[in-house]
Amino acid sequence: MERYRNKEIECMSREDMKKLQDERLVAQVKHVYANVPYYKKLMDEKGVTPDDIRSTADLYKLPFLSKADLREAYPYGLLAKPLSDCVRIQSTSGTTGKRVVAFYTQHDIDLWEDCCARAITAAGGTKDDVCQVCYGYGLFTGGPGLNGGSHKVGCLTLPMSSGNTERQIQFMIDLQSTILCCTPSYAAYIGETLHEMGYTTDDIKLKAGIFGAEPWTEEMRREIEKSLGIKAYDIYGLTETSGPGVAFECSEQTGMHINEDHFIAEIIDPDTGEVLPEGSKGELVFTSITKEAFPLLRYRTRDICVLTREKCSCGRTLVKMSKPLGRSDDMLIIRGVNVFPSQIETVLIEQGYAPNYQIEVDRVNNSDTLDINVEMSDDKFSDMVKDIQQKERDLAAAIKTMLGISPKVHLVPPKTIARSEGKAVRVIDKRKLQ
Ligand code: ADP
Ligand code: ZN
């Protein structure tokens, strides 16, 4: 039997949902225009006023926001409430240069946690469940979001955070966890470790997992479902829109329902910004219509996906998004951390290397690997050969400081990295996620 957290909303008729969105959008645009000078300026430049926005049909008139705006407005430029009304800050798993900070009032936290609670409920969660949350806690949104959602459902919550996998498994067995929340790669690793420790699925009580924050395939889903003996559900979100819970999977497991009472989704052509008809593949754009402190309008996620309104067997009428099929920028997600190749390039140049490098990402034993081949220049080559290993370690340390994750650096002789006649091929991603 399908469970709903808020059946009235989740199964609302399209017409009523549109009405709700219209009302909320109109109010939200007024709120932002009056309180966020940064966005008011963008609207003024486009010649659009709050009076021009009467319904969701007028959404296309509003300017887009992108990560570049978030950086420019960092830290307080997009805040729509006094700081004294905010109770929380979260930040992306991104890195120093690209960090995004999001602000929440208590109302914002409540609605975010409620979205996560919908996801847990859709995965079958009730107050009788034991929910083990092994997303990272802290600034990252995964842990706090699912933790809050689990409380709202009334599950007995195990705030494990990530890491210490044997202890995760010991608790899973001793405390009879029934729901697991973490990244899909960590879920796969937990499954592997469970079997390595000599246990089987008979030793655990898990029934469902809620996995997201990074791309994963249907193959990986099946593998995790088998090794943990569960049903694995996808969950999607980003710090800019609160965190996980913007969209969640139901029992049909054919895409994620977007919480449309809080977020209006559009698909645009990433090159022209034009809104594409339903069913087209393009960049996902979100407008948050209920957030108070950090209400981004028309935020470009850079995630490429498809929206569909086909009838879902779960009974929900909320629009469904496909798994993200790629990105319209060059961001990589490696071990859950957002990585831009340009950041690696910056370190190389700072350390006196030429920007001839290649990044190789792979997934070995369900864990991401990051290898960086860096060319030595002709003039330094003979000098460097003496202490290559030390130089590789130094460079790896500098890159770790920038990214927060450790790469393996390989210094290679001059002219060994293939030159390209067009765009340089900087990244070889062997993970085959799409
Ligand atoms: P989070 O805290 O959720 O990791 P970030 O802001 O650091 O948020 O990263 C958000 C990005 O993570 C999204 O834009 C998307 O590319 C990726 N992501 C989140 N959830 C999923 C998912 N279920 N499947 C694929 N990619 C996801
Ligand atoms: Zn459904």
Image (cartoon, rainbow, N blue to C red):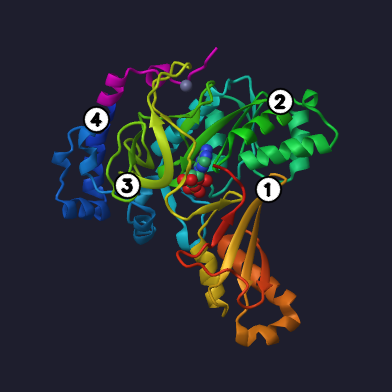
Identify the residue at horizontal 77%, vertical 29% (top origin).
173
Q: Residue furthest right?
A: 198
Q: Amino acid at mark 4?
A: Asp
1 vs 4, front mark: 1
Reply yes or no: does residue 6 show up in magenta.
yes
Say whether disc 1 or disc 2 marks the residue closer to the N-terminus: 2
Give the magenta-colored segment's residue range.
Answer: 1-19
Mark-to-mark CA distance, 3 and 2: 45 Å
Residue bearing the label numbered 3: 81
Mark-to-mark CA distance, 4 and 3: 22 Å
For the C terminus, give its image quadrant.
top right
Is 221 on the left or on the right of 310, as rendered? right
Identify the residue at horizontal 73%, vertical 35% (top origin).
191
Would you call the spot at circle 3 few (<14 residues within 10 Å), some (14-19), or many (20 or more)? many
Would you call the spot at circle 4 few (<14 residues within 10 Å), some (14-19), or many (20 or more)? many
Mark-to-mark CA distance, 4 and 2: 43 Å
Q: Amino acid at mark 1?
A: Ser
212 in relation to 16, above or below: below
Say whether disc 4 or disc 3 marks the residue closer to the N-terminus: 4
Q: Position of residue 95 (x, y in %)?
A: 52, 59
Residue bearing the label numbered 1: 367
| Residue labelled 1 has its Cβ within 8 Å of some atom of ligand 1 | no
Residue bearing the label numbered 4: 22
Mark-to-mark CA distance, 3 and 1: 40 Å
4 vs 3, front mark: 4
Reply yes or no: does residue 57 show up in magenta.
no
Q: Position of residue 255 (x, y in %)?
A: 48, 29
Mark-to-mark CA distance, 1 and 2: 20 Å
Residue bearing the label numbered 2: 229
